[in-house]
Image (spheres, rainbow, N blue to C red):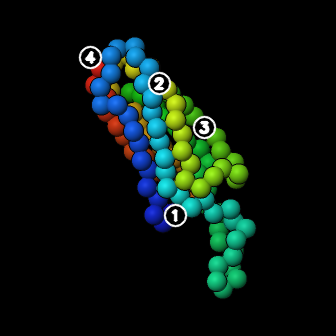
């Protein structure tokens, strides 16, 4: 598991039914390519975020596949239409097998 990984999410707390909201996500992650060496000359194992998903009440909203060229601390901004109150679940998948999850609730009036 990569050290110091911290997901950050911005989702409005409230919205109107059928409103398109803007969601912003950022995950602090060093994104090791597997090509660098440590001070002792040993290769640092590859550890990159290779997939990001967002689900709302169990239904998929976005699903991004990423490759080795993705930047450090990947940031995504996208819109989603919210038909009802519920919960967004954000998941980041790391090459090293680690999975990072965070949830955010939204109230629809």
Comes first in the chain, label 2 or label 4: 2
Q: Which residue is depicted at the point 63% across and 63% down?
A: 32
Q: Reading the chain from its start, which is encountered first: label 3 or label 2?
A: 3
Residue 82 spot, x, y in % from top left:
40, 20
Horizontal side of 79 relative to 33 (left or right) equals left
Image side of residue 16 versus residue 20, left or right: left
Other residues around mark 3 within 10 Å, as few (<14) / some (14–19) / many (≥20)? few
Q: Please provide percent x and percent y for residue 28.
A: 49, 56
Q: Where is residue 27 in the image (x, y as percent from the top left)?
A: 49, 51
Which residue is the site of mark 3? 64
Residue with the mark numbered 1: 2
- Residue position marked by numbered label 2 in the rendering: 80
As displayed, is residue 46 above or below residue 16? below
Q: Real-space Cα distance between discs 3 and 2?
A: 15 Å
* Mark 4 surroundings within 10 Å by alpha-carbon count, few (fewer than 14), some (14 through 19), many (20 or more): few
Residues 78 and 55: in front is 78
Q: Mark 4 points at which residue?
A: 109
Tag nearer the camera, 1 or 4: 4
Residue 72, image quadrant: bottom right
């Amino acid at each position: 598991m990569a050290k110091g990984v911290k997901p950050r999410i911005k989702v409005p707390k409230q919205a109107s039914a059928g409103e398109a909201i803007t969601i912003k996500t950022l995950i602090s992650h060093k994104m090791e390519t597997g090509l660098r060496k440590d001070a002792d000359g040993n290769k640092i194992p590859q550890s990159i975020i290779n997939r990001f998903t967002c689900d709302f009440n169990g239904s998929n909203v976005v699903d991004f596949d990423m490759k080795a060229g993705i930047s450090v601390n990947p940031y995504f901004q996208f819109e989603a239409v919210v038909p009802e109150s519920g919960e967004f679940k954000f998941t980041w998948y790391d090459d090293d097998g680690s999975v990072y999850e965070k949830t955010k609730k939204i109230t629809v009036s």
